[in-house]
Image (cartoon, rainbow, N blue to C red):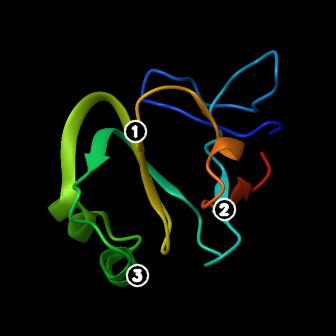
Amino acid sequence: CCPVYLGGSSSPYGIGTNISKRTCDQLRCTACDFRVSLFNDYIWDQSCDYLFFRNNMPELNKLRAKMIKKKGARAYACQCSWRSIDELTDLQTDQQLRWVCGKH
């Protein structure tokens, strides 16, 4: 993917390009070396913190404790970072995330 896009649940998955703006579903974190999980129609609760994800990734049953249903959104998380996204977003706009396309 180049550029790499994140997006809400209405954004299609696939290889992202400048012409075909698709959200990457093969994200990997270069900081914690975890695959980035994504959950359609959910956002993360504001009480989420680093330790919550460090202790609970990638177990969905434990993560659900801090997931809030929101139609059209998509919750992303690795073991060290997390985001709730509503609309198509270029990953380069968020300098704190260390996520890259893990190849399709």
The image shows residue 60, relative to residue 17, as above or below, that is below
Q: Residues within 10 Å of mark 3 (few under 14, many from 20)?
A: some
Q: Which residue is mark 3?
A: 54
Which badge, 2 or 1, is on the more N-terminal residue?
Answer: 2
Q: Position of residue 74 (x, y in %)?
A: 40, 39
**Which quadrant holds residue 51?**
bottom left
Badge number at residue 96: none
What's the distance in space between the residues labelled 2 and 3, CA to CA? 15 Å
Please give the name of the residue rendered at 33% of the width and 71% of the height, measured from the top-left corner. Answer: 59
- Tag 2's secondary structure? strand
Q: Which of disc 3 and disc 2 is earlier in sequence? A: 2
Q: Amino acid at mark 3?
A: Arg
Q: Nearer the viewer, residue 77 or 104?
A: 77
Q: In this view of the protein, which residue sits in the foreground, 93 or 52?
A: 93
As drawn, 11 above or below 65: above
Give the numbered dot on residue 28.
2
Pointer 1 residue: 74
At 66% from the left and 55% from the top, the residue drawn is: 95
Query: Disc 3 on helix, strand or loop?
Result: helix
Relative placement, left or right, of 40 versus 94 is left
Q: Amino acid at mark 2?
A: Arg
Coordinates of residue 48 in the picture (x, y in percent): 27, 66
**Relative to residue 65, is residue 39 drawn left or right?**
right
What is the quadrant of the N terminus in the image? top right
Label 1 Cα neighbours within 10 Å, binned few <14 / some 14-19 / many ≥20:
many
Mark-to-mark CA distance, 2 and 1: 16 Å
Marks 3 and 1 close (CB-CB < 8 Å): no
- Residue 38 percent coordinates (x, y): 45, 49
Mark 1: amino acid: Arg
Real-space Cα distance between discs 3 and 1? Answer: 20 Å
Q: Earlier in the sequence, mark 3 or mark 1?
A: 3
